[in-house]
Image (cartoon, helix red, strand yellow):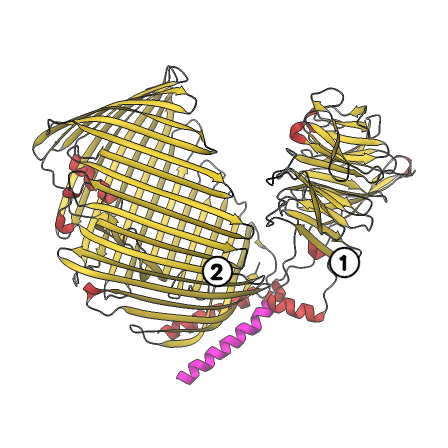
Amino acid sequence: MVAGILRNSSFLLVGLLLLALPAAGQITLGDLSTDLNGTLSAGYTGDYGNQIPSAHSLSFGGSGTLSGSYYNPNFVNFTVSPYLNQSRDNSSYQSLSNASGVTASSNIFGGSHFPGSINYAKAYNSEGNFSIPGVANYTTRGDSQTFGVGWAELVPGLPSLSANFQMGSGQYSIYGSNDSGTTDNHSFNLRSVYTLEGFNLTGFFSDGGGSSEVPQLLQNSTQDLSATSSDRAYGFTAGHALPWHGAFSSSFVSSEYNSEYDGGSSTGTVDTYTGAASFQPTNKLHVSFGTDYSTNLAGSLDQAIAGVGGLAPPVNLGQGTHSLDLLANASYSVMANMQALAFADHREQYFLGENFSSSSYGGGLTYGRPLLGGNFNGAISLSDNTVSTSSANSLGLISTVNYNRRFAGWTAGVGFSYSQNVQTQLITYTTSSYSYGGNIRRRWGKFGWSGGVGVSKTLLTEQAGQANSNQNFNTSIFYTHWLTANANYSKSSGTAIQGGMGLIQNPIPQPIVPIDDLILFDGTSYSFGLSSSPVRRLTLGMSYSKSNSNSTLQGTMSTNDNKMVNAVVNYQFRKMYFTGGYSNLVQGFSASGLPAANVSSFYLGVSRWFNFF
Amino acid sequence: MRCAHKLSSVVILLLVLLLLPITAWTARPKAKIDEPGPPELELEGGRKLIYERGFSSEREVRPKRGFWHRVVDVIAGEPDFKNLVRPYSVATDSHGRIIVTDPGAGGVHIFDFAEQKYKFIERREKDKDAMLGPQCVAVDAQDNIYVTDSETGKVFVFNSGGKYQRAIGSLKGGEGYFKRPTGIAVDSAAQRIYVTDTLRDQIFMMDMQGNILQTIGKRGGGDLEFNFPTELKLDGRDLIVVDAMNFRVQVLGRDGSFRYAIGKLGDSSGDIFRPKGIGVDSEGDLYIVDGVWGVVQVFNREGQLLYYFGGRGTHAGEFQLPTGLFIDHDDRIFIVDSYNRRIQVFHYFGMKKTTKEGM
């Protein structure tokens, strides 16, 4: 089967070469003008491992770009880029397997009042990622395709109208497990903008949805988790200028959603009304007022999960949940580089059969100035928060400090931020977080070094011990073109929800997502890479990465390992490239009950770039 | 079955290996065939201006390739010839080599058609005194090459072989003394270097070591006042300055004294809109490139328009955003056709010859 495909592909390659024989320069047929260039390659390749049959054979491949236009590039232009048997061993395509596919796009009537566009992409056997937040991604292999079309009407003096439709689907398998997954999505958007008597008017309609079959490899379940969702929304906004350099805007957005998750389903409608006005009576003073009202708070949280690609059961806050928010802001420039801020915020929410309200009043300062030969920037904001469920006030604090300077040939920067009792979407929960980091670099003639560190931690104030944290350390050195080396270490832990292509950090207060659907993760990863160009046109490169993570879902713990080695050597002689490459992947999930997959491939070959016509 | 498959694979490989070079051969860029230039311009008194040629690449300098070179070309492709990317200024040296600054390519091209040689000077990757934005070029009597760098604020000096000699205006810490050096002229006899600093609206007169001897001019619209001066040329006793945003050319003495100015703002023949390169032919007439209209206007020293040539376009003899201009001792006129990425060469056949000074 594979041999047949290879043989057919090779004949296609030969056919393309034959087609190119009489070609020289740009081809013009009537009003059609085209260019074609690309790379053809031939070599010897082999694959072996504990979960694939060993194979080695002659290999042919290539990639190309056919572009052109009809009559004029502003009338119709197009680009088609097919690729065949491209992998990290023999090309710059970052695929462990030999990926093939095509991408194509076309713009129609681009220079007119009615421009349109079409795009299409199809990929076979391409590499993808199954993600775990903060650590190196796990490797998948699969097929995917996307198709999109867009059109707009931009006639001066008339309301503009733009329409876009996009759809995509894919299926993948994960190295180291017997599991596979699928994703499917589509979206349609309409948008119109018009200015009438000084009012800026906008209307929109959107309809989208998708479905996923997500492998439960972290649970050793043979049954995929099934999730579908759909969302339909329409809305209007209107804005107008006001005196004192002011502006006013109001909007209404209504959305219907429907989601099915692991057998359960949820349907609802969220209507949101917003209004805002701002003024700048003097150059130094700026004030604004705003309000918004949502008829379905639980639906807003569901949409927050769907918005980051997460799959989770519907949020259950009871019937008739709604929220009202009133906000006022003022800022005043006290002096150059110093600005004072003041705000007042009042929220009312109804959920779990109860009314809740909160009020916040506060102010702050932002300041920046040259300091000790460097630049200093700082901001602090304090708030006094009261919530109806508690008689005690809480102090809210947001602060950031950054400083950078050059000294004795070094360039360095440090930053720190701390926040305490920051309101979440539900007023009964607040979060606190801190982060700090720094970077430094220096060059000594032909030698250079840089290093950086970043640490962050976020937690719900009311839920002790449930924090998301990330740490990252990186360094790199170089010595002219002879050597470039870099290394990275990162550590991450926290709670996540399932997404279509991996785990996603939970975007909403944790108690809202049932504990059974939260995935606890804790992982570390490190990597390093070397590259060198000892002589002109010769490049050598290698990279190594390793990550280990633990995940716990519904009492099932899985130890997940990933190790990737890549090495490549490339020499260019004019338009020819002599390439050798080696890749090795070791990946396993203890919950799957399978030994880790160990897959290797190598390639030795030559490729030639052609400007066919 | 397995044997047949291997055989078919080998046949395919042989086919590919055979077809690759043939395809490359047929698809290779064909030798450039010069399109016919504009008809020669017949001028008063039997004088005439003819279009000679245009060039844009190292390929046009290199000798015709022999059989084995061509075989290698077929298999591996032709070498990567350097092309003009965004050329700006041009000059020639005593050997007839054509020197072109190219800020787009980040270096200086040296075309030697007589010796069929080419060289590209660059200093982008250097830790000290990197050349980032080569702008205008001048050549002294020893064929040393002087290049202003408008980005780093320095003047770079290379010997005739293209080897770096020194940077003028390089301060401690790596910064350049000039704000935006553009035009440059070298008076070898008097050992003087003249550089326009466009943002300072001044001309600096220096000795050959870069010590400043005199500054000429200030911002304004009067005599010896400039509004973004750019190109410089030495001709006889004259120092000719393009006073770009005053839409004129000022002619000074080599000591910095004002002599006269020609040109006025306008959009008809004889007016100056966006003056770029300048040059002087053997009869002393002044050639001024207009970047927007894509023409070269020729004035006498009384400021009367004698004739013009060119026009906006891409054909031979036409220009798109022309910039630099240089006239050699044989009255060959080299014009940088910047947006068309080429140099166009015209030849003026005049009636009288005068001896130039200063080169």
Q: Quadrant of residue B181?
A: top right
Please tell me which residue lies in front, A188 or A398: A398
Query: Alpha-carbon neighbours of circle 2 within 10 Å: few (<14), some, or many (≥20)?
Result: many
In the shown orientation, is residue B196 left or right of residue A125?
Answer: right
- Numbered marks: total: 2
In the shown orientation, is residue A238 left or right of residue B302?
Answer: left
Q: Which residues are magenta?
A: B1-23
Identified by mark 1, the residue type is Gln
Which image quarter is the N terminus of chain B in? Answer: bottom left
Q: Residue at x 26, y 31 (%)?
A: A397
Residue designated by label 2? A531
Which image quarter is the C terminus of chain B in? Answer: top right
Please tell me which residue lies in front, A172 or B354: B354
The subunit letter for the residue under badge 2 reads: A
Identified by mark 2, the residue type is Ser
Please tell me which residue lies in front, B283 or A392: A392
The subunit letter for the residue under badge 1 reads: B
Q: Quadrant of residue A251?
A: top left
Q: Position of residue A220 (x, y in %)?
A: 17, 63
Q: Residue at x 44, y 53 (%)?
A: A476
Q: Position of residue A593 (x, y in %)?
A: 19, 68
Residue designated by label 1? B116
- Foreground mark, 1 or 2? 2
